[in-house]
C-alpha cells in the first residue's frame, strides 16, 4: 500500500531506484482503487484512472523537483505528497499514533494508560483522541489494531 512505501521511506530505507518506487506506488494505488471501486464494477475505469493518476503524479513531482532544484528522491516525494494534500493529515496522525504506541508500549512495561499519556504529550493530541485512534484504528495493511 502507499502508506507502506511512505513508512519505509520515513524509516530511512532508501529506495534509490525510481522505477521500483513508481512500480510500488502503482501497485499500492491499484490496491486502494480495487478496494474502493470493485463494488461498482468499474474495473476498466479504475485501470484508466490509475494509469492517469500515476502519469500525472510523477510528471508533477518531476516538475516540482526541477523547479525547486531538488533531487528526485524518497524524502522529497514524501514531502511532495504531504504538501499537496495527497496524504491526509488524519492519516498521518493515525498512522503515527498506532506505530508509536506499538513501539512505546513495551518500554512502558505494557502499561497502556502510561503509554497513551506519553503519546498525548509528545504529539499534543488529547488523551481521549489517542484512545479513540487506538480503539478504532486499523493497521494500514487491513489488520485491526488491538490496544
Image (cartoon, rainbow, N blue to C red):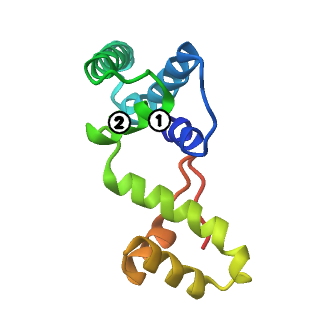
Q: Residues within 10 Å of mark 1 (few under 14, many from 20)?
A: some
Q: Residues within 10 Å of mark 2 (few under 14, many from 20)?
A: some
Labels 1, 2: front one: 1
User: Residue 142: in sight, yes or no?
Assistant: yes
At mark 2, the secondary structure is: helix
Q: Position of residue 36 (x, y in %)?
A: 38, 35
Q: What residue would you read off at disc 1? A: 75
Q: Is residue 72 depicted above or below 74 in this figure?
A: above
Earlier sequence position, callout 1 versus callout 2:
1
Left or right side of 24 for 55: left
At horizontal 37% and vertical 75% (from top left) the residue drawn is 124
Quadrant in which the C terminus appears: bottom right
- Report which quarter residue 59 is drawn in: top left
Left or right side of 13 for 7: left
* Label disc, if present, on residue 81 of the rendered structure: 2
At horizontal 66% and vertical 86% (from top left) the residue drawn is 111
Q: Is residue 47 depicted above or below 135 in this figure?
A: above
At mark 1, the secondary structure is: helix
Amino acid at each position: 500500500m502507499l502508506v507502506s512505501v511512505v513508512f519505509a521511506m520515513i524509516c530511512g530505507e532508501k529506495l534509490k531506484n525510481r522505477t521500483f518506487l513508481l512500480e510500488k506506488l502503482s501497485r499500492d494505488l491499484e490496491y486502494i482503487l480495487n478496494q474502493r471501486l470493485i463494488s461498482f464494477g468499474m474495473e476498466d475505469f479504475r485501470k484508466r484512472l490509475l494509469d492517469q493518476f500515476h502519469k500525472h503524479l510523477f510528471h508533477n513531482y518531476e516538475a516540482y523537483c526541477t523547479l525547486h532544484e531538488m533531487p528526485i528522491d524518497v524524502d522529497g516525494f514524501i514531502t511532495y505528497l504531504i504538501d499537496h494534500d495527497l496524504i491526509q493529515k488524519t492519516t498521518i496522525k493515525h498512522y503515527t499514533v498506532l506505530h508509536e504506541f506499538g513501539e512505546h508500549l513495551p518500554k512502558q512495561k505494557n502499561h497502556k494508560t502510561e503509554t497513551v499519556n506519553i503519546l498525548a504529550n509528545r504529539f499534543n493530541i488529547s488523551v481521549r483522541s489517542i484512545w479513540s485512534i487506538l480503539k478504532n484504528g486499523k493497521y494500514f495493511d487491513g489488520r485491526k489494531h488491538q490496544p
